[in-house]
Amino acid sequence: MGMRHGQTRGLLLIRGGTVVTAQASFRVDVLCGGVGEILAVGPDLDIPSNGTVVDAGGLLVMPGGVDPQTGIGANAAGFARTVAALSGGTTTLLDIMHPDGDRLDAAWRDWRHAARHAHVDVGLHMAMPDSSTAVLQHMDGLVVEHGINAFHLSMADGLSDRDILKLTSHAADCGALCMIEAQNAQAIAYLRAGLDHAGITGSEACLLSAPPAVEVEAVGRAIMLAGLSGRPVHVGPVSTTGATEILAQARLRGQRVEGHVLAAHLVVDEAVHDPEGDAAPDSCITLPPFRDGAHRRALWGGLASGNIGMVASGFRPAGGVGNGVADGLAQRMRVVWQHGVRAGILTAEEFVAATSQAAARAFNIYPRKGAIMPGADADVVLWDPDAQETCTSGLYAGITLGGRAVQVIRGGVTAWKDGMPCEGAGYGAYVPCPAFRPQLSERMRRAAHLSMRDGERHDRGP
């Protein structure tokens, strides 16, 4: 699996559909080809000679979905399962790799080898085990040599505040962003020990050991730590009303902070943690746990307001490292369409932002990804907005999904059509995420410093 550019593709004209981007919807044609990019967008484009015409009549034409968080790691079998992402309209995912100690270069090689089996394009977030000198030195090389511009920091795994300060600062200095999984590890460990003593384990213990206050405190602390050093930060997944409010407050202060939610947390109820329930136990062992309706309504409000920018699947194969859910690649976009757009909470344009463009922007791969415009990758989904069905098994059992990916084009080639993968579509490409511009990092730093000056009046005279 290599870079897409360099292999010439035949021309493909998508006509008759309604193009939906995060900015607007309009009736235009889309011409794909070259080395896998969009060549032209406009009304009544000429039919190319020796090209293929795709009739999108009655369908929406949208950018391929960008999933901002999976936890597949160096698991070739896990990447082979990403055909499910194609079935749900996702053409790019950003995966998290957990290294063994400070062996970041070895972790990169192992992940890269496994990711060759992906059916979608893939980028990487590298998890940081600590803030040792060796780790900091490796961060520079990952940014410059391998196109990694986001580092995953897990408070849930016990990463200290000092580590977070050092890592967020160093990441910004080399043009990268930190993603913080914000949970209070010590509180969770204390509560878990008491539950173990009482004989409460498994999925039920996941819920009882991570009450909402544990997440709310950690999200606030993560944002505060990033603000102390004037660094932008990405927090998630969030699952509570309190975390949503903290994100909104930080953004109102002018702090550069992004957040994401897992699709499952938008629709799955805390009742799945009932030890006598019908849900598969393995699919419900996750951090954060699933919450009640009040928290879910707040998460939808966060998406509608933009304070939570994007929706991830959180997919992690069984036995994988880190937190996540063992389902969701296929369901992610359909959950947001049914319970967001069809419910009247989001517009179709906001759907594109939450499932594609926001993640592409946050991790600096827009407009290559998340856009329908000349020069963007020809990752396009032909979407039936009226399709609807109810899941019968897995984590989403009993939950209605809306919309359907009728045809998925990845890099100008049809990779999914009529409910099945297409032969000859090949595998996805590696997507390097460019470093953020130094001058942009400096501007973010100044804005974050200002946002921490609570109570000060900027219009006060001398």
Image (cartoon, rainbow, N blue to C red):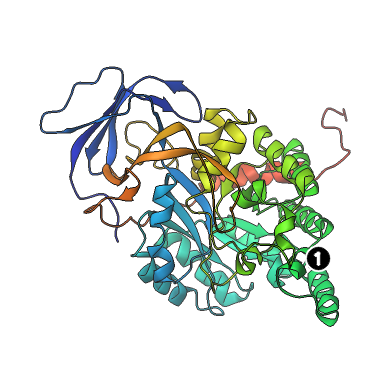
**Nearer the observer, 243 or 440:** 243
Residue located at (54% from left, 36% from top): 337
Residue located at (42% from left, 54% from top): 84
* Image x and y of residue 134, in percent: 55, 77
The quarter of the picture where residue 122 lies is: bottom left
Residue 55, visible in the rendered structure: yes
Quadrant (top left, top right, bottom left, bottom right) of the C terminus: top right
- Extreme left residue here? 50
The quarter of the picture where residue 191 lies is: bottom right
The quarter of the picture where residue 177 lies is: bottom right
Q: Is residue 407 above or below residue 22?
A: below
122 relative to 391 in the view: left or right: left
Quadrant (top left, top right, bottom left, bottom right) of the N terminus: bottom left
438 relative to 224 in the view: left or right: left
Tell me how many marks there are: 1
**Nearer the observer, 121 or 146:** 121
* Image x and y of residue 209, in percent: 80, 67
**Nearer the observer, 444 or 129:** 129
Q: Amino acid at mark 1?
A: Leu
* Image x and y of residue 344, in percent: 63, 28
Q: Is residue 360 above or below residue 306?
A: below
Within 10 angstroms of label 1, few (less than 14), some, or many (20 or more) residues?
some
Q: For numbered disc 1, what is the local secondary structure? A: helix
* Image x and y of residue 460, in percent: 87, 29
Which residue matches tag 1?
A: 208
- Extreme bottom residue here? 197
166 relative to 241 in the view: left or right: left
Residue located at (53% from left, 79% from top): 100
**Nearer the observer, 448 or 346:** 346
- Extreme top residue here? 44
Residue located at (31% from left, 22% from top): 16
